[in-house]
């Protein structure tokens, strides 16, 4: 790495920031040698000796955690961009552990009064000669590690002390332990599928059908129905074996690192809800979408996100909304969620003026280059839209499942391609080339099932991919306007993601 750039970064760091960087490096550098570091240059020399500055990734993580986004942007002028390596973790290019990040976050929120109390509560565990020189929470944490009172697998003492001083900080430690799987959980059994089958066939779900929601075309003049040979009702006993799900086992310690979920709030959840259209290109209003907005607002509020809603955005204002959100600082956030409910076509969603917004334009403002404060953090996009104009056909219809009649409309809009940057997840309502459906009274099939399963997964400590797999299963079991629907998640997540209730 350019030494002039490192020197410039060093000049901008104060002593407390250097101490914070040294603390974050305790897992990758010799701790004895870290004690002799007095400035940024000294730390950079130690990192170079370990070949940790061959690219920007590790230094980018350090600067991001301590909140120096201005210095993080300096790295972009040095040729290789941080996001080019953000998805690659090797021995030569390690990622900061969630344990180390959590401790730093705790230290930042310890007041002077609580620091004095913490030192007092540790006086029977640590020699006074060790505690008295500690002037910061980081120094106390380092001393606890030296005395083996604090390790990644030994957090009891820290949590006990914090419960006496600041319950919110103790909760941060507890959340880290739960997400890591170090706290045993009660076994839960998965809700029987038959419950959903009863819901599908209940009289309350029977409604009349409506027309498609895609741009009008000659093929939309007729209702498309599945052919008889593609939708054959099986005789009892001739269909596939019924899928059964065994009870979920207690959490085990995960071999894969998880994303940190300790901030309050977790981050921002932006909901773009296009309900009323201007009549361009024959686009009609989207009744039922208010139910999706309500469900998303409720579930993500419960998961600890700050929810913001933007309604009836044109192409220009939709792009402006995501660009404004990407321009904010997300240092005090663990994740980002963006939900888009609109008309659309393959490769894009539509503004209320009929303008096309590519999916890539929605995600671009949140790459590590454009939004360094979200680097290494999960960015989730859920889009209620079709990926084409075709109806998906099914091979078999189980006797126990009745078709869900109702006032369904099809939303169009799709992923052109996922930006190949780390830590993105894009959940689409349906696979490419096919429609998705929205009940004009109850909301869309995908969003309603997504919210239901997010709540289910939060109660049971499931990771997001397990949740989305179950969404796929439940949505695909239904029949809508004689057609099927299969959601499609695409992701570049690099760790397990858990979304617990806050």
Image: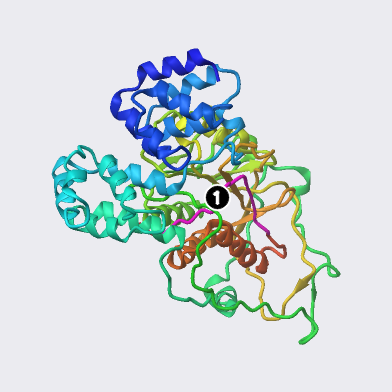
- Is 397 positioned to the left or the right of 385 in the image? right
Q: Main secondary structure of the magenta part?
A: loop
Instruction: Note whether 179 is above or below 250 in the view shown.
Output: above
Instruction: Note whether 172 is above or below 58 in the view shown.
Output: below
Image quadrant holding the C terminus, namely: bottom left
- Is 270 positioned to the left or the right of 103 in the image? right
Name the one closer to the observer, 278 or 391.
Answer: 391
Mark 1 residue element: loop
Q: How many labels does the image show?
A: 1
Seen at 65% across and 36% down, the residue is: 281
Name the one closer to the observer, 366 or 76.
Answer: 76
Q: How is the image coloured?
A: rainbow
Residue 267, visible in the rendered structure: no
Residue 259: x and y in percent read 48, 49
Seen at 21% across and 44% down, the residue is: 130
Name the one closer to the observer, 455 or 18.
Answer: 18
Give the residues in magenta.
Answer: 486-500
Residue 23: x and y in percent read 37, 38
Residue 41, visible in the rendered structure: yes
**Residue 496 magenta:** yes
Q: In which quarter of the image is residue 125?
A: bottom left
Q: Quadrant of residue 355?
A: top right
For disc 1, the neighbor class at 10 Å (few under 14, some 14 to 19, many from 20) is some
Residue 127: x and y in percent read 19, 50
Name the one closer to the observer, 145 or 85.
Answer: 145
Instruction: Note whether 247 is above or below 167 in the view shown.
Output: below
Image quadrant holding the N terminus, namely: top right
Which residue was labeled with disc 1? 495
Residue 293: x and y in percent read 45, 51
């Amino acid at each position: 790495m350019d030494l002039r750039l490192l020197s410039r970064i060093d000049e901008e760091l104060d002593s407390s920031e250097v101490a914070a960087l040294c603390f974050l490096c305790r897992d990758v550098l010799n701790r004895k040698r870290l004690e002799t570091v007095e400035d940024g240059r000294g730390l950079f020399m130690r990192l170079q000796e370990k070949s940790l500055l061959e690219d920007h990734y590790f230094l980018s993580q350090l600067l991001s955690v301590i909140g120096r986004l201005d210095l993080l942007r300096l790295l972009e002028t040095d040729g290789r961009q941080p996001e080019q390596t953000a998805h690659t973790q090797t021995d030569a290019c390690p990622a900061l552990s969630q344990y180390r990040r959590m401790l730093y976050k705790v230290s930042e929120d310890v007041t002077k009064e609580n620091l004095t109390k913490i030192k007092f509560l540790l006086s029977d565990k640590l020699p006074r000669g060790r505690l008295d020189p500690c002037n910061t929470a980081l120094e106390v944490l380092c001393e606890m590690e030296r005395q083996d009172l604090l390790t990644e697998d030994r957090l009891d003492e820290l949590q006990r002390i914090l419960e006496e001083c600041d319950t919110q900080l103790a909760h941060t430690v507890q959340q880290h332990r739960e997400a890591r799987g170090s706290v045993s959980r009660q076994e839960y059994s998965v809700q029987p599928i038959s419950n959903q089958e009863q819901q599908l066939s209940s009289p309350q779900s029977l409604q009349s059908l409506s027309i498609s929601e895609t741009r009008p075309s000659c093929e939309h003049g007729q209702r498309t129905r599945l052919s008889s040979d593609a939708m054959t009702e099986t005789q009892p006993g001739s269909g596939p074996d019924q899928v059964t799900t065994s009870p979920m086992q207690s959490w085990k310690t995960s071999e894969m690192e998880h994303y940190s979920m300790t901030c309050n709030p977790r981050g921002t959840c932006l909901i773009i809800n296009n309900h009323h259209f201007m009549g361009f290109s024959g686009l009609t209003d989207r009744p039922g979408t208010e139910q999706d907005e309500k469900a998303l607002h409720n579930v993500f509020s419960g998961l600890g996100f700050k929810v913001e809603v933007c309604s009836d955005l044109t192409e220009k204002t939709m792009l402006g909304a995501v660009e404004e959100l990407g321009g904010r600082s997300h240092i005090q956030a663990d994740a980002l969620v963006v939900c888009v409910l609109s008309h659309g076509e393959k490769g894009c969603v539509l503004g209320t003026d009929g303008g096309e917004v590519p999916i890539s334009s929605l995600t671009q403002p949140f790459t590590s280059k454009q939004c360094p404060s979200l680097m290494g953090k999960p960015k989730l996009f859920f889009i209620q839209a079709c990926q084409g104009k075709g109806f998906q056909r099914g091979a078999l219809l189980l006797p126990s499942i009745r078709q869900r009649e109702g006032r369904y409309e099809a939303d169009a809009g799709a992923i052109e391609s996922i930006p190949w940057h780390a830590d993105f997840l894009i959940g689409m309502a349906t696979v490419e080339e096919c429609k998705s459906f929205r009940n004009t009274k109850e909301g869309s099939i995908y969003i309603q099932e997504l919210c239901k399963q997010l709540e289910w997964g939060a109660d049971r400590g499931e990771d997001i991919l397990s949740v989305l797999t179950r969404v796929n299963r439940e949505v695909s079991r239904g029949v809508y306007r004689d057609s099927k629907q299969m959601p499609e998640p695409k992701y570049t997540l690099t760790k397990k993601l858990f979304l617990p209730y806050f």
